[in-house]
Amino acid sequence: MILTSCYSGKLSIDKQERNLVYVKPVIIRSDEGEQPAKSTIPEKQIERVYQKAKIDFIFLNPVFWDNTKARDGIYNLDQISQLATEQKIIKARDTLYMFFVNAIDRRNGPMGMGMQNGNLIFIALGDSLPDGFHDTLEDMQTFVIAHEIGHNFNLKHAVDDPNVPDNIPNIQGDGPFKDRINPKYSLNQYQIQIILKSPLIHKK
């Protein structure tokens, strides 16, 4: 969750050791197929957050789903998941399905919910930064998405995990968005080991 929920060096990476994660964006619109939820995906920035885990995110072509109640947070996440499964929008367990909505459980963005150690993520980007934050809009959007992906990888909030210090920036911790998404600080080695056990990881 948001509100829990620039490093310029180049890392030496062996291309033979890359880990692939397939992401299927699902953009929800009204029942009439209009007014889609905001669906900005800062792909390069998200990859930078996870670059120490040597992850390549493969963003597949998005699909549009026409369902006003799902888009606007009137249906809860369990209902959305069930409907999306019944309508064959969710098809594979090893693909990350990223649903873009206007609200989550009737709460407007910016916020997100990622299924812990699962393959569903719900993102309500919102249109502005929360009060008290002075980052760029892209920093916030990157954080919201990357933080929730962390839950899909089975990462806990820093405050709930003794293996992740909560007094320094981390993708699962507190602080300015730009610091939390900085690849110099975003992940520690313990978190990388957790990530690489995820069923969402495909070896290249």
Image (spheres, rainbow, N blue to C red):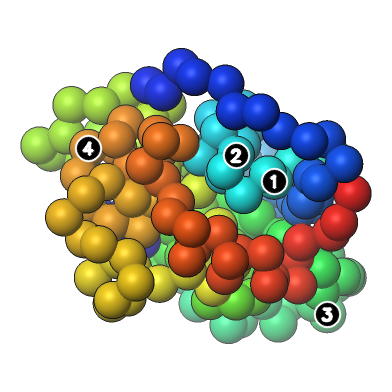
Q: Kindly report the distance in space between the C-alpha atoms of the residues bearing marks 4 and 3.
A: 40 Å
The kind of residue on which mark 3 rests is Glu
Q: SS at mark 4?
A: loop
Q: In this rendering, does residue 8 appear at all?
A: yes
Amino acid at pointer 2: Gln
Quarter of the picture containing the N terminus is bottom left
According to the picture, the residue beneath numbered tag 1 turns out to be 55
Q: Are marks 4 and 1 in contact (CB under 8 Å)?
A: no
Q: State if disc 1 and disc 2 touch (CB < 8 Å).
A: yes
Q: Which residue is mark 4?
A: 176
- The residue to which callout 2 is attached is 51
Question: Residue 91 appears at what percent x and percent y?
Answer: 88, 70
* Residue 84 position within the rendered picture, expressed as x and y whole percent measured from the top left: 75, 71
What residue does disc 3 label? 86
Give SS at disc 2: helix
Farthest top residue in view: 8
Q: Residues within 10 Å of mark 1 (few under 14, many from 20)?
A: many
Q: Looking at the image, tell me whether mark 2 or mark 4 is earlier in sequence order.
A: 2
Is 176 situated above or below 6? below
CA gap, disc 3 to disc 2?
35 Å
Give the CA separation, mark 3 to mark 1. 31 Å
